[in-house]
Image (cartoon, rainbow, N blue to C red):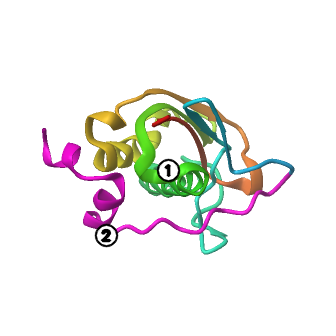
Amino acid sequence: MSNSESRTPSQALEDLGLTLPAVAAPVAAYVPATRTGNLVFTSGQLPFVNGELTHVGHVGAEVTAEEAKEAARTCALNALAAVDAEVGLDNVTRIVKVVGFVNSAAGFTGQPGVINGASELFGDVFGERGQHARSAVGVNQLPLDAPVEVEIIVEVAQ
């Protein structure tokens, strides 16, 4: 078992120097996460830090791909906070699916690289259990002009 496999997700976050933020307040009529059976589905998470978006605008225009990748990592951390509030982070047994939306300028085709910001964080925190199926989708607008939005499905212990 690798070091990342023997640590709990909470320990891995601590080792990375990361702290789960407070769960982002919904910006419309929904809940941050919901559980059915042994799966937890998060709502789309924007790159909020202390209630403010880290960047705004289209990736490939107002926001660079590298800035958007970091924003995707922030979205992933916010998704983990929603999961933690619902079931406790250390009860996650696998990241099942990641869906990432990238607010893309015309001609921008680097969506997979942007969403790697989220995928890499899940790998750092969960090791092999963080490997997941994924979609990285370019869109022409996101809520509040956020550059990226990420939602996840996780499996949890029964």
Dividing the picture into quarters, in which one does residue 37 lie? top right
Q: Amino acid at mark 2?
A: Gly
Give left or right: position of 20 versus 106: left
Residue at image mark 2:
17
Disc with the residue nearer the chain's start (1 vs 2)? 2
* Residue lying farthest to the right in this orientation: 29
In the foreground, 7 or 151: 7
Q: Main secondary structure of the magenta part?
A: loop
The CA span between labels 1 and 2 is 15 Å
Residue 153 seen by the camera: yes
The N terminus - image quarter: top left
Counting from the top left corner in percent of width and height, residue 29 is at: 86, 49
Dot 2, how many residues are within 10 Å of its Cα: few (below 14), some (14-19), or many (20+)?
few
1 or 73: nearer the viewer: 1
From this viewpoint, is residue 118 visible?
Answer: no
Pinpoint residue 45: horizontal percent, then vertical percent.
63, 50
Mark 1 lies on a secondary structure that is helix
Please give the range of residues in magenta.
1-28
Residue that label 1 marks: 76
Amino acid bearing label 1: Ala
Residue at 32% across, 44% down: 126
Circle 1 Cα neighbour tier, 10 Å, few/some/many (<14 / 14–19 / ≥20): many
Q: Which residue lies most toward the front here?
A: 158
Q: Answer above or below: position of 146 versus 112.
A: below
Foreground residue among 47 and 151: 151
